[in-house]
Image (cartoon, coloured by chain):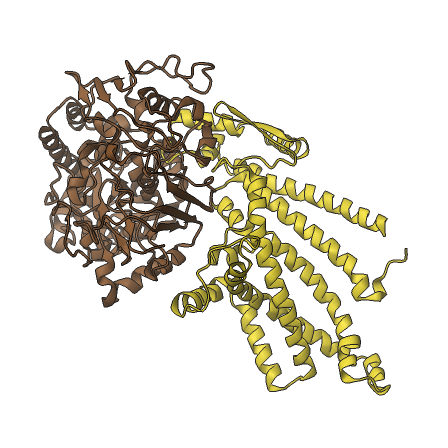
Chain colours: A yellow, B brown
Amino acid sequence: MLTYILRRLGAGLLLLAVVTMVTFWIFYVLPRWAGVTPQGMAAMYVGRAPTPEALAATVDRLGLDQPVAVQFVEFVRGLLFGQEFTFGRETVECAAPCLGYSFITNSPVLPQILDRLPVTMSLAAGAAVIWVIGGVTVGVVSAVKKGSVFDRIAMSTALVGVSMPIYFTGLLALAFLVHQWGLFPVSRYVPLTEDPVSWFQVMLLPWITLAFLHAAQYARQTRAGMLETLNEDYIRTARAKGLSERKVIFKHALRPTLTPIVTILGLDIGLVMGGAILTEKVFSLNGVGAYAIDAIISNDLPVVIGVTLLGAVFVVLCNLVVDLLYPIVDPRVRINA
Amino acid sequence: MRKRTLGFVAVGAAASLFLSACGAATESGDNEGGFDLGSTEVVNPSEEQGGTLRYAMAADFDSTDPGDTYYAFSWNFSRYFARTLLDFSPEPGEAGNELVTDLAVDLPEPNDDFTEWTIEIQDGLTYEDGTEIVAEHIKYAIARSNFGGGTLSHGPDFFAQFLDQDDIDVYENGADPLEGFDSIETPDDHTLLFHLEDSFSEFPYILTQLQTAPVPPEADRGELYSENVLSSGPYKFDGSYEPGVGLNLERNEEWDPETDPIRPALPDRIEVELGVSKDEVDERLTNGELDVDLESNGVGTSMYGRLVDDESVQDNLDNPIAGSLRYVNIHAPIIDDLACRQAIMYAADRESMHRAWGGDMGGDIATSLLLPDLAGADTDLDLYPSEDGTGDLEAAEAKLEDCGEEDGFSTTIAVRDTSERDIDTAEALQESLARVGIEVDIEQYPAAQFFGQYAGSQDFVRDNEIGLSVSGWGADWPTGYGFASAITHGENIQETGNYNTAELDDPEINELWDQSLTTEDPDERADLYGQIEKLVMENAAILPAVFDRSLFYRPDDLTNVYFHPAFMGYDFMALGVDRDQ
């Protein structure tokens, strides 16, 4: 088991290295291929009407004129061993793992990400709870009562949920539930540790909105899985030997259905942890996703690479957790120690 | 302060300037609202202190370091914690363009040829930590933002342009950062003497710059200073500035109101929330959940549509002239024959360009160069008149004949890809020019590099034969020179980053600009600016489209509200709130 975990972690690290290189390539090499000069890149980080001297100073300060390979090695070295940065007369140490300083705001990338992580984690965790419980419950009921009015309404709603982008449902929810009817408070994030009640109140609407999108998928997946399982011979056997319907459904039918659900859950949580960009933007939550999109728009390369790496870390970790959960959900895939 | 200009021109929307006229602030009375009242009068006047003033916006500061910022809203806001030598009079309308003192005792005194200026600062001024503000700190602040080896790169560089100073780098200077910085002398703790390279009669306007806000060398942390600025104003940072998230200010007990003629400092606390989407900002503003849109560029498109048709909110709206001219450059190197350029001026359908820019609430039709509030401006000037403003096609055809292009010609118009109104304006022009056989291709380019690599790059313009470009410009400071010299003086033509995009280089115009620098009397200068305006129009280098307007929502419980022309937004220093929290 330990070797399995170590092997998976090793593969994860390799993946992270590849992600880093590809991201670096996209943001540092591609622009050069497209003919953007170091001065052209620097122009994105200085004032509105930069003098040639200011541009040259910025190129020099950010090391934009160095070969991309050198910049990459510098970055990796900072990541592994830390780096020193000079601001004015002040030298600041950026301890490993150093993701550098933002080109735009001159703030250190990793602490900025960590500051925003609680927002994103709050969003991901709450929404996931709602979408899993809601989606799976609806899916099970729909499967058991296949063809009923509930089933039809639930599945149509699910279709609507899957088809509606967050910036539509989210804006509608904000316009009516918050501003028009005042059912939810104005979305200003409050840390859980500071005021749990306000935290819950503020996060509830973003949770529901994000969960609505995902729950639909889980409901449909659960329903399909359940319908398939309910037709299996062993279910007939279970029923034949007189087990209660509740036991048949929850113990025998639901469990195998959960395996693919856990898989997509792992991926979804990993992705949302890397930043639910639209949800965060619509609800003005300053999480990792909002940080990422702002960085991409302003070409803030260290931040882009930082959040990409972080997103990749979450996807890798969540996948690992999912793989470790498999044997618990489904005894058939247990690894022989 | 190109900040005015570029800050919002780049954003593409309109910040704001007052219309003009009218005048003095109303000291008392029931000014509780009325359409566009805030453009000319103080609405909800009050001296009531207390409460929290809430700001929010979608974007972020370019920097909270007063020495490193260029955006108009940032300048306006930074005055909460950064006092400058001079400032603009806290009044609505044209009166707001007058200079008044802030840290200074009096306006500066020039020598005979305007190459030396002396100014004194008040006694007993202190920072938030109680230490005294001395002249050398102002000298240092100017040095770090203009001679810091590019460390602080966001702000304007007027001091670098005008001071008689060799290049130094305060951050590389070792023990004495001001070594070699002798263009500003500080004979005592309260006096500053500026040595300029050339005569410059409007130098006092440069002393309103945030870069004159004092910074003690020992407090300077380079780019990191923006995290926590040492306050000289009525408020100080409460905790650090969090980029993209927010900034909170609390009262600075060391600030002495007796020394400050600009800031009533009404709220007890000021909160800024960043990264709130524009739609959400507008929703909160109209629902009483927010006091001010920090970005100060008016409500967004979706709210705009709702507000203009809603009778019940008209009293809460202001629709000031937003402080910029929207125009089309006619590039002299590409369309080199004057008559051909004039044909374009005649053929342009200003009525349709005005509609493209949003009609009456979007702005006023412009046929002249200078912003309406500037001394010397003649908004009635119309050298290429036509019935109903739809263009004089006969005159245009005659001009085409003059330049030997009877059948018209083809050219390309460059436009920023993010500005819908710019694109619409280009399309309107395209249609109107097609009527006389001038075929125009519209090419969109990335807004961020528009002047750096595209329309403002001489090589690019020539290689791609770009004859026209859609642009916008606001005043760096509120005079003819502060507005138009950057876009019409031949000296300002640059290889790249060229804002004199038409490449207008007329000896007579250049001479008049230079003459204004040594002219003491503001009225005489205004007269020169009027002459320049006419010459630019005769040269057909700039095709004016509109003086743009923005639509502002003014919440009921905001007090002391008026639109300030110099800051192109509500005067943040004046604002208070009429509620307990």
Residue B93 pos. (x, y %): 17, 45
User: On screen, B440 above or below B355?
Assistant: above
At horizontal 30% and vertical 35% (from top left) the residue drawn is B2
Dividing the picture into quarters, in which one does residue B123 lie?
Answer: top left
Residue B456 pos. (x, y %): 34, 35
The answer to whether residue A23 is visible is yes
The answer to whether residue B460 is visible is no
Residue B559 pos. (x, y %): 25, 52
Left or right of residue B300: residue A224:
right
Please name whichever residue, B429 or A102, is drawn nearer the observer in this view of the structure. A102
User: On screen, B141 above or below B263?
Assistant: above
Please name whichever residue, B433 or B291, is drawn nearer the observer in this view of the structure. B291
Please name whichever residue, B286 or B381, is drawn nearer the observer in this view of the structure. B286
Left or right of residue B384: residue B258:
right
Tell me the quadrant of the picture where the N terminus of chain B can be found: top left
Left or right of residue B36: residue A85:
right
User: On screen, B243 above or below B512?
Assistant: below
Dividing the picture into quarters, in which one does residue B156 lie?
Answer: top left
At horizontal 56% and vertical 45% (from top left) the residue drawn is A115
Dividing the picture into quarters, in which one does residue B169 lie?
Answer: top left
At horizontal 29% and vertical 16% (from top left) the residue drawn is B186
Residue A327 pos. (x, y %): 82, 62
Please name whichever residue, B214 or B3, is drawn nearer the observer in this view of the structure. B214
Left or right of residue B472: residue A331:
right
